[in-house]
Amino acid sequence: MARSVVRQGALAPKSYSILAQAGDSGVDMTTVTAATIEVQLPDGSRPSWPALLSNASVASVLVTHAFAAGDLPIRGFYAVLARLTVPFGSNVLETDPERLAVLGEFEVEDLFFDP
């Protein structure tokens, strides 16, 4: 699995994307009407990032957030997941959490990750 790494304070056009897959849910991913990316920062705070949907197919949809001021205030590992709105059933689906590493301006990636 590729590591997701971004610099602290990054701004658009830098972005973060999650490929949300239908898996065994039985949901047609073309019916997803909206999405957010839910985040837990290393300090425990839990912001929600607005997201755009693209490349929808029956099996998957790409959920993307373009970074804005204040999105990446501290370095460390962020837990991120996509929350998808669908027009039926439970009305909300979530992906499994992923880990996003936020590095300082001059931090070297190899020193940030455990070997």
Image: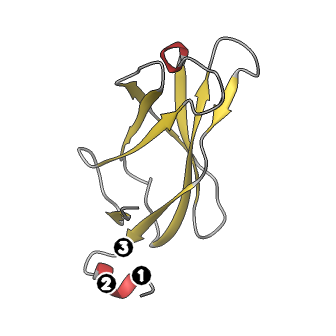
Tag of residue 110: 2
Q: Residue at x 47, y 69 (%)?
A: 74
In terms of depth relative to the viewer, which is nearer, 89 or 83?
Answer: 89
Gap between marks 1 and 2 measured at Cα: 6 Å
Q: Residue at x 65, y 11 (%)?
A: 87
Q: How is the image coloured?
A: secondary structure
Three-letter amino acid code of the residue under disc 1: Phe
Lower position in the chain sequence, tag 3 or tag 1: 3
Q: Residue at x 57, y 46 (%)?
A: 81
Q: Are marks 3 and 1 in contact (CB under 8 Å)?
A: no
Identify the secondary structure beneath mark 3.
strand
In terms of depth relative to the viewer, which is nearer, 63 or 38?
Answer: 63
Q: In the orientation shown, which residue stands out farthest toward the front?
A: 24
Q: Position of residue 34 (x, y in %)?
A: 53, 22
Three-letter amino acid code of the residue under disc 2: Asp
Of tags 2 and 3, the one toward the viewer is 2
- Circle 2 packing at 10 Å, graded few (<14), some (14-19), many (20+), is few
Gap between marks 3 and 1 measured at Cα: 10 Å
Identify the secondary structure beneath mark 1.
loop
Q: In the orientation shown, which residue stands out farthest toward the right?
A: 90
Tag of residue 102: none
Place residue 84 in its image quadrant.
top right
Q: Badge 1 is on which residue?
A: 113
Q: Badge 3 is on which residue?
A: 103
- Circle 3 packing at 10 Å, graded few (<14), some (14-19), many (20+), is many
Lower position in the chain sequence, tag 2 or tag 3: 3
